[in-house]
Each structure stands twice: as C-alpha cells, then as structure tokens.
Image: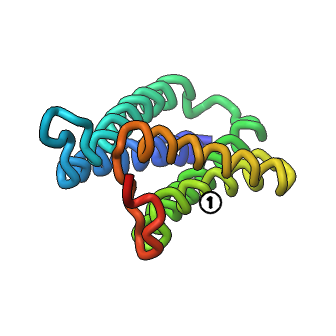
Amino acid sequence: MRRLVQGEAAVWALLTCLALGMAAASFGFGITREGGQVGPGFLPLVSGVLLAGLSAATLVGTLRRTAPEQPVEQAERRRVRTLWIVFAMLLAALLLVPVTGFLVAFGLLVFAVSAFVERRRPVPALVVAVVATLVIYAVFVLFLNVPLPGGLLGIGGEG
C-alpha cells in the first residue's frame, strides 16, 4: 500500500521534472519573434510551466491524501497503472518528435490514449486523433504562424 503511493508520487514527480525541462528547453526556440510576435518556444514554455504546476500540485495532493496504513483499493491500483501507461506513451511521443515531427507524434499519442487507455474502437479513436491534430495545426501553424517541429518527415514545420 505504501508502495502504491510512492509509485503514484514518482509519476507526478517525473512529469513535473519533464515539464520543467520542456519549459527550460523552450528558450532555445525563441519565446518571441521580432515585433513581439509569438515565437516557436512560446507554446512549450506556457504548457511546460502549466503542466509542471499542475503536476506538482497533484504530487503534493497525493502525498497528503493517502496515508500509508490505509488499505489500497483495486481501483486505485488501476488508476496508478493507467497513469504510468500514459506517462510512458507521452515519453514515447516526445522521443518520436525528432523523427516524425510534432503533429504526427501528437496524433499517434492521442490515438494511443484514446484506443488503448480509454478503450475506444479504432475508427472513433482515429477520428479523435485526426480532429485533435488538425485543431493543433490550425491554431499554431495557420492562426499563430508558429512552426511546429517537423522532424525528418518535415510535416508541420512551416506556417
């Protein structure tokens, strides 16, 4: 039971560190462009800071909420396992970005979470992934004119 709390806390701590790393790396892409326009590093900075804050708050809540002597329910174990699975999928997606580009990695991540974690059928999961990817493309590349990492495939790199 104590081990379960430590496992969940470890996931939130890792996610906090990953998000802080993402925020720190964003400065290398440029937060703003000339004329005060949003730069390619703006999204990773904002999302990294927000994700780090939410993850750190959840980490603190996890450590406060669960006393080691309380019995652990099966649902709680399943929740922690799901959290680890999503964390592993996120890490895999981040590792794919240099190869596939952000849009493809993001679409694959959304599909994998929808199909394997939420257990949706393949066609609805694919629709969710395509729509989410198109929305990200429309907002960042077309509307904000922020090029996303295109990877070796070069998809989404130009606005």
Asked whether 109 or 13 is in front, the reply is: 109
Left or right: residue 31 compared with residue 57: left
The colour style of the image is rainbow
Name the amino acid, label 1: Leu
Left or right: residue 81 compared with residue 16: right
Which residue appears farthest toward the left when viewing the image? 34
Rendered residue at 39%/60% (across/down): 157
Disc tally is: 1
Rendered residue at 60%/31% (across/down): 69
Residue 147 in picture, x, y percent from top left: 35, 53
Left or right: residue 122 compared with residue 58: right
Rendered residue at 21%/42% (across/down): 31
User: Which residue carries the number 1 mark?
Assistant: 108
Quadrant position of residue 57: top left
Asked whether 36 or 106 is in front, the reply is: 36
- Judge whether 132 appears above or below 35 on screen: below
Quarter of the image with the N terminus is: top right
Residue 46 in picture, x, y percent from top left: 32, 35
Classed neighbour count for the residue bearing mark 1: other residues with Cα under 10 Å, few (<14), some (14–19), many (≥20): many
SS at circle 1: helix
Rendered residue at 62%/60% (across/down): 108
Left or right: residue 132 compared with residue 21: right
Residue 133 in picture, x, y percent from top left: 58, 49
